[in-house]
Amino acid sequence: MCDRFVEHTSDPLTIREAKRLANVILQHQSTRRRPWRVDYAILFEHYVQHLFREVAQKRSCSLVCNPRYLISGRAPAWSLRYLEPDIVLQREDNQLIIDAKYKSHMLNRGTISDGLKDSFRHDLHQVLAYSSFGTAEDKQVALVYPAEVFICQQQQISNPLTRATTNVHLVGIPLDIARKGEAQRELDKLIARSL
């Protein structure tokens, strides 16, 4: 059990703020009592962005988190106003579009269910839509899910009409701080292969 989170100046601001809040809670120093919750989907997305940001800096790649692809024109009230991938990693004309999903897909790789298939189909269509704005003929996308150990499986989607391809990397990242270094080394290999 953790008694206190140590704040480091090298930690990103959001991590320092999270540690500060966690310390207040752990030390029972708050005078206010109010319910709260952690949105693990957002937490996982930020953790994945943090990992990729550190690796991208070492590889001299540009990285943008949550860019908004604006949608304009006349549309019904329920229409989307923008698309927003979690991460766009770029080197020259090559892009790797990354979308983090806090779902159990990589924890259930041996399971066959309509629910998993439908959810994965939605995730895949979403990341493919994000990749359609890149200029490279051969696209690179990654769907990142939580996993017990680091996993990276590659699939390739080929268009027989245009011969364009999209490499889909299914990535599982452990939420274990002791495995952070391993995850970063493996992400570095993924970036080297993709860009």
Image (cartoon, rainbow, N blue to C red):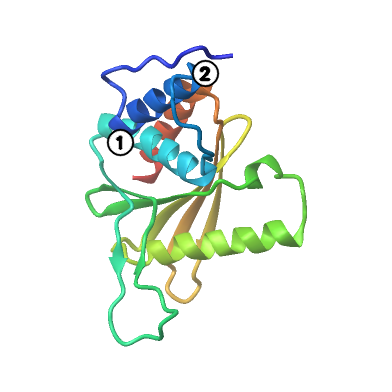
Question: Closest to the observer: 43 or 125?
Answer: 43
Residue ID for mark 1:
56
Marks 2, 1: nearer the viewer: 2
Q: Circle 2 sits in a helix, a strand or a loop, which is it?
A: helix
Quarter of the figure with the N terminus:
top right
Disc marking residue 25: none
State which tag comes first along the sequence, 2 or 1. Answer: 1
Q: Position of residue 155 (x, y in %)?
A: 56, 52
Q: Position of residue 89 (x, y in %)?
A: 31, 47
Q: CA distance from mark 2 to mark 1?
A: 21 Å
Q: Residue at x 51, y 44 (%)?
A: 39
Q: Circle 1 sits in a helix, a strand or a loop, which is it?
A: helix
Question: Closest to the observer: 58 or 193?
Answer: 58
Instruction: Note whether 99 is above or below 124 in the view shown.
Output: above
Instruction: Note whether 2 is above or below 137 in the view shown.
Output: above
Number of labels in the image equals: 2
Instruction: Note whether 128 is above or below 146 in the view shown.
Output: below
- Under mark 1, the amino acid is Ala
Q: Residues within 10 Å of mark 1 (few under 14, many from 20)?
A: many
Disc marking residue 178: 2
